[in-house]
Image (spheres, rainbow, N blue to C red):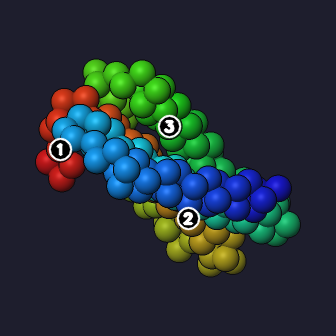
Amino acid sequence: MIEEEEKRVDEMEVGIDEACILIIARRQPAASDLRLVMMVTKAVNDLERIGDEAKKIANHAVILAGESTTSEGYTEVRHMGKSVISMLNNALDAFARFDVEAAMRTLEEDKQIDLDYKTALRELVTYMMEDPRSISRVINILWVIRSLERIGDHAKNLCEQIVFVVKGKDIRHQ
């Protein structure tokens, strides 16, 4: 089911990109209108990549469900998952309302997600060293938390685009 939805997201990305190209070619937007069209193309790309990461998470979840009886690492996944879902919801809400203040608050959430990722990475590597039999399973969990961290990065990108379209200011890489 996730794979079917991910294909649909890919198709929508292509359609929206084509529509944006037509808008640029036919209407030749200027200033804020052009920023809006460019933001949409970048946002669509980030949303498509979020779909790719969700597909990866689903694939690893299937593998984990079939191979493990221990729950080591799942707490980290659950914690990061909740944080990332909250951040993505906040980013999408700010995007829908062109709310720069909400976007800026949401940008700050990425710092905590990055910190949680590094902490979980250290804990899981330590666990693998203590129990080498867990390496295969923990590697799958590491891929899941990596995907969650990447989803947070894409949500951050959405927030940066909101600031760009509303204020005309590029805050990436600052």
In the rendering, at what x and y percent does residue 6 appear?
A: 68, 58
In the rendering, at what x and y percent does residue 59 appear?
A: 73, 65
How far is mark 3 from mark 1, CA to CA? 20 Å
How far is mark 3 from mark 2, CA to CA? 20 Å
Which residue does the numbered mark 1 point to in the structure image?
Answer: 170
Amino acid type at mark 2: Leu
How many marks overall?
3
Residue at point 64% right, 64% down?
Answer: 56
Foreground mark, 1 or 2?
A: 1
Is 74 in front, or is 24? Answer: 24
SS of the residue at dot 3? helix
Task: Determine if residue 57 is in view.
Answer: no
Q: Earlier in the sequence, mark 1 or mark 2?
A: 2
Residue at point 14% right, 48% down?
Answer: 174
**Callout 3 touching callout 2 (CB < 8 Å):** no
Residue at point 70% right, 61% down?
Answer: 7
Foreground mark, 3 or 2?
A: 3
How far is mark 1 from mark 2, CA to CA? 32 Å
Say which quadrant the N terminus sits in: bottom right
SS of the residue at dot 1? loop
Which residue does the numbered mark 2 point to in the structure image?
Answer: 142
Amino acid type at mark 3: Leu
In the rendering, at what x and y percent does residue 8 appear?
A: 70, 56
Amino acid type at mark 1: Asp
Which residue does the numbered mark 3 point to in the structure image?
Answer: 88
Q: Is residue 153 left or right of residue 138?
A: left
SS of the residue at dot 2? helix
Residue at the limit of the structure toward the front, as seen here: 26
For disc 2, the neighbor class at 10 Å (few under 14, some 14 to 19, many from 20) is many
Task: Determine if residue 99 is in view.
Answer: yes
